[in-house]
Image (cartoon, rainbow, N blue to C red):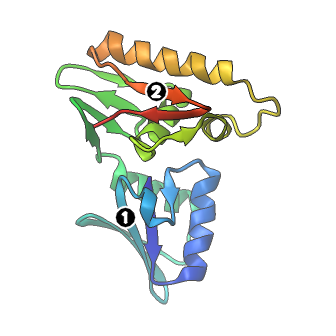
């Protein structure tokens, strides 16, 4: 998750809501800033979006499509390394030295949450709700099937064994 910060809390919350609507991996919480921090610097008539040593500037008021595209432009080359794999949360890809794979949305969401809660665990029902927020009936078997499919996919394409354990309704991903 990217942590989002700003010099203007009111506008920060508005931007946060915009990004959450498009399922952007964003948080206001320090505890989940696995990918780094995005800073929104609001001035009188412009917004500067800063990430690492890069920045994008847009005029105020801004079109939400331009705002989200500018953030995507800043983050599209950022990768998270775990074990021998590289994960790009914006492009929804995973790769190693020799190959790359575009993830299905479900697998991307599982991997995102796995990295967010690595080695500490997440309740299976909570994970299910993050992946399928509109489902009325929660079917843990559906989640288990997708977890197994992701595990098999990573093993097939990258010879990577995704390790996780499940105990009393909580799943823990064992990722370095």
Question: Most extreme residue toward the top, as rendered?
Answer: 156
Residue lying at the far left of the rendered structure: 97
Q: Is mark 2 on a helix, strand or loop?
A: strand
Q: In this view, does 159 lie above or below 53?
A: above
Q: Residue at x 58, y 78 (%)?
A: 11
**Disc 1 marks which residue?**
37
Percent of width and height locating residue 132: 68, 34
Instruction: Point out the residue furthest to the right here.
Output: 136
Who is closer to the viewer here, 123 or 9? Answer: 123
Instruction: Say if 80 sits above or below 5 in the image.
Output: above
Q: Which residue is drawn at 35% across and 39% down?
A: 88
Residue at 59 percent across and 20 percent down: it is 144
Label 1 crowd (10 A; few <14 / some 14-19 / many >=20): some
Disc number for residue 165: 2
Nearest to viewer (mark 1 / mark 2) = 2
Residue 13 in the image: state x and y as whole percent: 60, 72
- Residue 19 is situated, as x and y percent measured from the top left of the image, at 57, 57
Res 63 seen here: no
Q: Where is residue 67 in the image (x, y as percent from the top left)?
A: 51, 62
Q: Which quadrant of the figure has residue 122?
A: top right
For this rendering, which residue is in front, 30 or 5?
30
| Dot placed on the residue nearer the N-terminal end, 1 or 2 | 1
Quarter of the rendering occupied by the C terminus: top left
């Amino acid at each position: 998750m990217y942590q989002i910060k700003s010099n203007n809390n009111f506008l920060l919350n508005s931007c946060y809501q915009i990004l959450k609507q498009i399922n952007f991996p964003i948080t206001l919480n320090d505890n989940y800033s696995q990918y780094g921090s995005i800073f929104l610097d609001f001035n009188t008539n412009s917004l500067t979006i800063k990430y690492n040593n890069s920045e994008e500037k847009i005029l105020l008021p801004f079109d939400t499509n331009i705002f989200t595209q500018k953030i995507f432009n800043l983050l599209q080359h950022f990768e998270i390394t775990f074990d021998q794999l590289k994960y790009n949360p914006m492009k929804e890809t995973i790769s190693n030295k020799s190959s790359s794979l575009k993830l299905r949305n479900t697998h991307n969401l599982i991997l995102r949450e796995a990295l967010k809660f690595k080695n500490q665990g997440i309740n299976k029902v909570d994970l299910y709700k993050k992946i399928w927020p509109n489902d009325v009936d929660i079917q843990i078997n559906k989640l288990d099937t997708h977890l197994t499919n992701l595990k098999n996919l990573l093993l097939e394409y990258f010879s990577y064994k995704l390790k996780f354990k499940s105990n009393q309704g909580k799943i823990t991903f064992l990722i370095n």
